[in-house]
Image: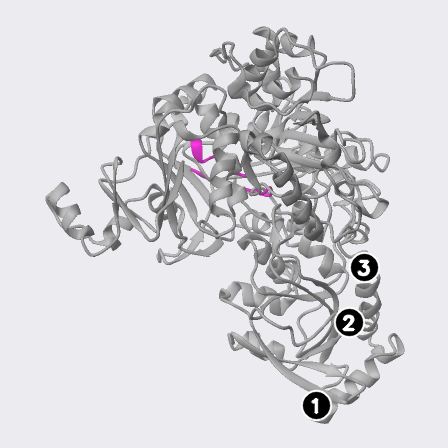
Amino acid sequence: MIKLSEGGAYLLHGTEIVPDGAEAAAQIKSRTGREVSQEEAAKNTMVYGILQEHNTSGNMEKLKIKFDKLTSHDITFVGIIQTARASGLQKFPIPYVLTNCHNSLCAVGGTINEDDHMFGLTCAKKYGGVYVPPHQAVIHQYAREMLAGGGRMILGSDSHTRYGALGTMAMGEGGPELVKQLLSQTYDINMPGVVGVYLTGTPVKGVGPQDVALAIIGAVFGNGYVKNKVMEFVGPGVAALSADFRIGIDVMTTETTCLSSIWQTDDQIKDFYDIHGRVEEYKELNPGEVAYYDGMITVDLSEIRPMIAMPFHPSNTYTIDEVNDNLKDVLHDVEERAKVSLDGAVPYSLQDKVVDGRFMVDQGIIAGCAGGGFENICAAADILRGSYIGSDGFTLSVYPASMPVYMELIKNGCAAAILETGAVLKTAFCGPCFGAGDTPANNAFSIRHSTRNFPNREGSKLQNGQISSVALMDARSIAATAANKGMLTPATQFDGEIGKYKYHFDANIYKNRVFDSKGVADESVEIQFGPNIKDWPAMGALPDNLVLRVVSEIHDPVTTTDELIPSGETSSYRSNPLGLAEFALSRKDPAYVERAKDIQRAEKARMAGEHPCQAHPDVKPVMNVIKKTYADASHENTGFGSTIFAVKPGDGSAREQAASCQKVLGGWANIANEYATKRYRSNLINWGMLPFLIEEGELPFKNLDYLFFPNIRQAVEDKADVIKAYKVSVDEGTLTEFTLRLGELTDEERQIILKGCLINYNRVDA
């Protein structure tokens, strides 16, 4: 079904794979009539060509990328614009689209959601942007319909910013990276590796894009095969997939931890642009005659079967048939994994979902950038047509990804077919993907065509004793399950017809409602604020030395950004840095916030010119031990704050708040064995936090220990990688030395850390 090459591979004429090895050069010469070096072939990927066109450094090993367009939603754009305003923003230098698809319910915290929306509208007017009102489109669907272009690059402040199927290399990053683009700075990365995804065959009836995506995620997530690389989709199987089908696979590449994605394009993609009135944006993309890839994933589409990602990760994949055939073993495995994911906070069992030997689910959701596409919903309608979801506990909700998609479903009758089953059709909203809509009952099991199924992404709260769970499935199998009133059913068992529907895009829907400045800024516009929209608090520069207290120690194999700062209704507070920070690690380590604020008292006192020992009783004995070895260390040159340890933090969302909440609570660093994603590490750096790495094994410290980092500022200035640190033992009066690494940092990243954060680095009056 899916095979991974053990090393690199060449692709000849887009159709023949030649594994890298001793005989590769001879095989290539015999088939092309000339010698082709690996270096030359590596430049023949689509990825290389697009990056070269957008690189401003003149060095393809050290990229400085300028993007063509930017996009954000209403959880992120307030913080981004506030940061840019603090740095002197006068006008959006490139098209910037502000969508309102996350905090759209306007139901939490009084006026705060709609206050954010009005902030966005007035900023779009003042700085020359585009504002998409609530319920019109989810961020990525609007980008597909109105922003994407062949050979273009788009940066979005959402991790699922993926438009590769349309020939657009798109990346999801934390807000500070968009701030850099708004200030005409660059996105700085090393040339990423490129992994080919070679598709063959044709999907069987009942198999949808989520099935293909989950099969790939299951094959590559755990081994890091594509981590921080770009996935390039090629091969004869591409032509067998519609534009919508490709889009559905592409958006889920985020869950592999890859950096971005790109697909070869053809007439089906040209038709997509034509349908949306933008055929001039189409560009044919193909790899060169001989292209070299750092790895090759081979996927036979005809062998893919309906998949399910069981709780609590998109990589926990099985075929639905495997689950049904091995219920006892699969459920036991999920329950064992849950002990790690949930830390035993609540009892968790799925045994009560087995009724007469069949697995029964409680809820179905088809939604968002992954599930809410036109073809997915049409296929679900055909499978559901003439069936009824029943009047018991099972529910089904369908969210078209944009109002134009919704309109076409009404016109072609699919909306009616869905509604008469007892299902509910709702407007474009991302809530079910991050825990802000359709939260199921306690102990309920929800199947969703959405992007993630981490703990609490369905809205339950462990700290309140609540736990429900989500499995990811394709819309087709969700519909088949709904037609069986909640009995888990693969869509391959559906024996009716799944039609092909022609899509007609109604551009007037956006023309009549979306504000588009056409890039013209109006400086006379006054920005509309609300009581919850707060400025970032003052943040100091990196001091000469640091004393950090470990305030959380997490040994899970992976820590998600949801666990660092939960989503759901807490997202409504993201325009208030200090207010949101109160929720940091609340679902993973409820003691974290008070511990961080406790040691922060010492730094606040120091910043105010007071002696920190007056604010915190631990400062004096800790400093007494340090002074035995480092006599020059004092409260004038030594900062105080917190750090956390996690094995592999940062999987999942691009949300900068996973880092910024730690920073505003006095965090100066993370310590990890590795970072799950490049974007989380970048978020730490942009908020002036040190992204320390420590070798796997027994830690030289534990939670609540104090750590001393002498001459840390000088080490950053000197571009040191190995950093000397000490555990401070007050009772023994000793310092125990250990070492960490900082990893590679650009000159700009070092300056951001030295200044204390990106705001300080860019501040006009700095």
Q: Earlier in the sequence, mark 1 or mark 3?
A: 3
Q: Which mark is residue 593?
A: 3
Report the side of 299 relative to 560 (left or right). Answer: left
Rendering quarter of residue 714:
bottom right
Vertical comparison of 185 with 601: above or below: above
Task: Please state, as top left, top right, bottom left or bottom right, where the N terminus lies in the image.
Answer: top left
Task: Tell me if label 2 and label 3 are in contact, CB under 8 Å.
Answer: no
Task: Say what secondary structure mark 3 lies in.
Answer: helix
- Image spot of residue 694 (x, y percent): 58, 70
> Would you name the residue on which mark 2 appears?
704
Q: Is residue 120 magenta?
A: no
Vertical comparison of 617 with 751: above or below: below
- In front of the other: label 2 or label 3? 2
Report the side of 297 relative to 72 (left or right). Answer: left
Indicate the amino acid at tag 2.
Answer: Leu
Distance CA(mark 1)–CA(mark 3):
31 Å
Residue drawn 71% across the image and 61% down it: 663
Task: Please state, as top left, top right, bottom left or bottom right, where the C terminus lies in the image.
Answer: bottom right
Rendering quarter of residue 311:
top right
Distance CA(mark 2)–CA(mark 3):
13 Å
Q: Is residue 159 magenta?
A: yes
> Would you name the residue on which mark 1 appears?
632
Colouring used for the render = one colour
Rendering quarter of residue 417:
top right
> Can residue 373 be seen in this snapshot?
no
| First to last magenta residue range | 152-165
Task: Say what secondary structure mark 1 lies in.
Answer: loop
